[in-house]
Structure formats: structure tokens, C-alpha cells
Image: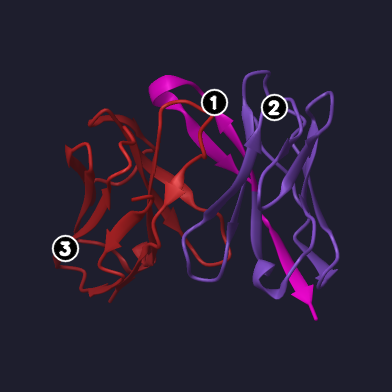
Amino acid sequence: DTEVTQTPKHLVMGMTNKKSLKCEQHMGHRAMYWYKQKAKKPPELMFVYSYEKLSINESVPSRFSPECPNSSLLNLHLHALQPEDSALYLCASSQDSDEGVRGYTFGSGTRLTVV
Amino acid sequence: DAKTTQPPSMDCAEGRAANLPCNHSTISGNEYVYWYRQIHSQGPQYIIHGLKNNETNEMASLIITEDRKSSTLILPHATLRDTAVYYCIVNRGAGNNRKLIWGLGTSLAVNP
């Protein structure tokens, strides 16, 4: 299995809703990432988990709450989002070294619309 | 901070080589250069990466200048399916703090 699987593919939520995005990989990668991408912009890093521990939080608002239940799963819990949070949310995974590896593997993303 | 600069758009004729340049003049000695591409509304797809030496795989070649201040991604025989946004990226940091520093991307249009 050489894929990162994200669910759901599309999500519409109200500003008072609570929802979760899910990401799964079975490549044995020990680092997992959440990115946010707005239209015509590159992905922006939100969080990095390394060996199931949060190692980087890029000053993301607390209405986004990441969780890594085990080495294969990564969740992003959403609560009280704003319309400007509408974007493509990408999950990625990688090994913890640049040498001899094929880089970071990205999922297809969740298209989130906040209404 | 290491960052990359790319032309915003390029055109290429189908069957010809596409040469996509990238400037990363502030790159540090241990930072790798990565190239990814993104077809509309899909997740980024890994193409190639390198540190100092030129690299080649089944998708592309990566030419890195000796001073490492710039690189060129070469798609040897572009097809219509290569139409995408191509990102030149520097991987900064080490261990738990590695993260990708993305350029703004080059939108490549391959024309019939």
C-alpha cells in the first residue's frame, strides 16, 4: 500500500458544527502532516506529528485540533470554524530522513466549505 | 530562511522537453530540493528530489548547479497529462522538525 487515504473527500459544515477529518497510511511512515491549501496558493503547513507526538504547530488557531491515535492514523478535529477556513485540507506522511526515500506522500485532500 | 523562486507560468509543446527553473539562493548545505506537481484539485504528487548530484528517475531529471543556488526540473517528453502546477521545494530542518518550504509554483501548460 503506497497511499495516503483521506476521508471525507468533501465536507460542508456550519460555523457551530463539530466535525473531524481523517487520514490513514500503511506505509510504516512515522511522520504525518496536516496542510491547508487555498485556491492558487501552495499548501501551508499546519501540524507535524513525529512518532505519534506533536512536533510542530504552525501557530494554528485552537479551533483546529489534531490527534494521532496511532502510527497509521491522523485526525483533525474542527469546531467553530469561520468561512475563511474553507480550503483543501491535505494530509501527508513521510519517513524521517531525506536519504534514499521517495519523499512525502500526500492524500487527495478534503475539500472543506464552512457556511 | 531558505525559499524558492519560480516563474509563474510556462508553455511547452507536446513531445518536447519541458525545463522548469527554480532559484533557491539561500539554501543551506544539508537541505534537499524537492519537486512536486499538483493537477487541479488533487493532492501533490512527488516527482524527484536531490541534494548535490543530478538525479534521474522514471518521471524526470533534476539538474542542480554546483553552487546549489538553482536547479532545473526536466520532463524529457512532455505529454498533455503533464499539465499541472509544479512546485520547487526546500526541505528545511532535521529530525522531528523537518518541513517543506514551498515556492509559489509554475503552472505548466503542455499544448498539442
Q: Earlier in the sequence, mark 1 or mark 3?
A: 3
First to last magenta residue range: B88-112
The residue at 52%/39% (across/down) is A102
Q: Mark 1 lies on which chain?
A: A
The quarter of the image holding the C terminus of chain A is: bottom left
**Distance from Cα at disc 1 to Cα at disc 3:** 37 Å
Farthest residue, direction bottom? B112
How is the structure coloured here? by chain
Q: Chain for mark 3?
A: A
Task: Give the farthest residue toward the top.
Answer: B29
Shown colour of chain A: red
Marks 1 and 3 share the same chain: yes
Q: Who's the residue at 30% across and 60% down the image?
A: A6
Query: Mark 2 touching mark 1, by CB under 8 A?
Result: no
Element type at marker 3? strand
Q: Which mark is residue A19?
A: 3
Give SS at disc 2: loop
Residue A45 quadrant:
top left
Q: Measured along the vertical axis of the image, is residue A112 above or below residue A49? A: below
Q: Which residue is drawn at 33% across and 51% down?
A: A1
Tell me what residue is drawn at x 26 percent, y 28 percent: A51
Residue denoted by label 2 = B27
Of circles 2 and 1, which is in front?
1
Determine which of the numbered discs, if any, sits on residue A22 in the image.
none
Question: What hue does chain B carry in this figure?
Answer: purple
Which residue is identified by label 1? A99
Q: Categorize mark 3 by other alpha carbons within 10 Å: few (<14), some (14-19), many (20+).
A: some
Residue B20: percent from left, percent from top: 79, 53
Circle 1 Cα neighbour tier, 10 Å, few/some/many (<14 / 14–19 / ≥20): few
